[in-house]
Amino acid sequence: MPVGEALEDLLANAPFGLYVDEPTRGCIYANETLLGIFGVDWNDFAGFGWARFVLPEDAERLQTAIAEYEEERSVISVRYRVRVESEVRWVHAHVEALLGDGGRHVGSLGVVRDVTQEENRRQNALEAQKLEAIGQLSARLAHDFNNLLTVMITGVDLITPEVGSDNGREQIAAISTAFAQARHLTGQLLTLSRARLTPLQATPLDRELGELWRLLTSTAGEAMTVDLHLGAAGSHVALGSTQLAQVAINLVSNARDAMQGQGRIAVRTYRPEPARARLEIEDTGTGMGPEQLERATEPFFTTKEVGRGSGLGLTTVRELVDMAGGHLEIDSAPGRGCTVRIDLPEVGSDVYVEKRREATTALAGSGVVLLVEDNDALRQSVGYALALAGYSVVAAANLAQGRAHLHRHRELAALVCDVLLPDGSGTELVAEARARQPELPIVTVSGFAGEDEGAATRQDRRSAFVAKPFRPREILEAILRLQ
């Protein structure tokens, strides 16, 4: 093979794209590799034809780089995106000037690489860093907000018996509803931060949704109709009842907003295949386009008006479904409504199931309860609630004070301890208390306890964990349940 042909073959099949352009005629040569990167033939690429495939969002940046190059004749190195049929690819171009007699610019030589995979890895790493930062901030905010919520609802519960007027009771009911909504929101933040990961639980899907039906219809609003079609009887899924409620409420809320509060929502369950259960929620709203669908589960992304949504709903659903080993799929198009399908693996009903305690008219006890909580207002309000129930309360604001009280009181009726304390972990005090008094009822509380901390409180039948924000009754019920 002649040298010229060999060189031409080498350039045509080089592992990177090569091109030569001329200032007035544009591209006058491109090898086969470069044409393959752009997914076009020479007729479409030649001259300035290649520029038609650059994404408009990147065109201005590319033009600016070219202008600087034309002025300074400096080497440019730029990344931009090109559309190849329905696919978008990232390319990296390294361009150097070709100079003629007297330094006259006669053209350019460019080396182009397809860096799509490299760019995707970089974007994924940036997304992971962003999510981690958002998660840490979310967990911190949720922790502080949960303390405030607990103080407020504790105060409301304590003054409720003193309220005699109908108007006063209506206001109390409104505050309680707002508390439930706020608790739901902080739960979303904690799920987003992965700060509230719970051990595997098995919840009967149909039974739980049947019990949630009234809450779902209330969430949808008076002008909406919620149809419930339950076809997965006996199917248990790996979500706690609270987590399943988060999933259902978020999806119904999104469906309601998509229909501007008027229309019909269908909630269905069935088994698409053995050992799997499916929850499907369908609306007849405005639907979403491809770009919205692609971003639908991103944190804080929302198509709603400012003030109408946090952008956490579908993110929370996705995180919970992922934790349960399931799969989420969204089927939607503009004007065609939206259907969200969630496939979950079935689990045996013998897996730990979240137990519920029927409300009783009175919760009372006796003996000394050691309460360890660093938030002053929360410590005071919970202590007051325990005292009203008949307990003698000794309170501590940190781990050191808690240890001092533990050694001073040989026999306790219960220990109520925050997991995170200014001078250490509450689990240290829990371990010391358990060693001294093996049958002591211990209730740990936290605004964002992680899996290890939460699991540590469930190691024996005398321990329980209550997530903030909580109502005083939840602490009292936990103590009595453990006695």
Image (spheres, helix red, strand yellow):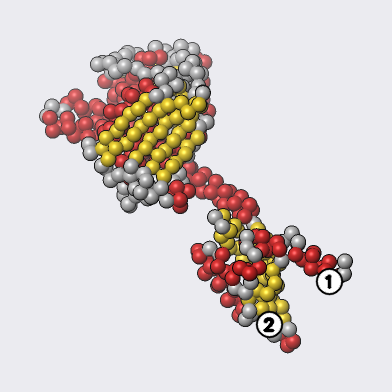
355 horizontally vs 275: left or right: left
Say what secondary structure mark 1 lies in: helix
Farthest residue in the bottom direction?
102
Say what secondary structure mark 2 lies in: strand
Mark 2 belongs to which amino acid? Answer: His
Q: Position of residue 222 (x, y in %)?
A: 22, 36
The residues bearing labels 1 and 2 have C-alpha atoms spaced at a distance of: 26 Å
Q: Quadrant of residue 463?
A: top left
Q: Residue at position x 40%, y 33% from top?
A: 280
Q: Which mark is residue 420?
A: none
Q: Residue at position x 55%, y 46% from top?
A: 128
Q: Is residue 25 visible?
A: yes
Q: Which residue is mark 1?
A: 4
Q: Residue at position x 31%, y 31% from top?
A: 227
* Viewport quadrant of the N terminus: bottom right
Of residue 398 and residue 239, the one placed in the foreground of this image is 239
Mark 1 belongs to which amino acid? Answer: Gly
* Front disc: 1 or 2: 1
Q: Earlier in the sequence, mark 1 or mark 2?
A: 1
Q: Is residue 451 above or below residue 185?
A: above
Q: Is residue 145 above or below residue 101?
A: above
Of residue 107 and residue 134, the one placed in the foreground of this image is 107
* Viewport quadrant of the C terminus: top left
Q: Position of residue 186 (x, y in %)?
A: 38, 37
Q: Which residue is mark 2?
A: 105
Q: Is residue 178 visible?
A: no
Say few, some or many: other residues with alpha carbon within 10 Å of mark 2 (under 14 / 14 to 19 / 20 or more). some
18 horizontally vs 194: left or right: right
378 horizontally vs 455: left or right: left
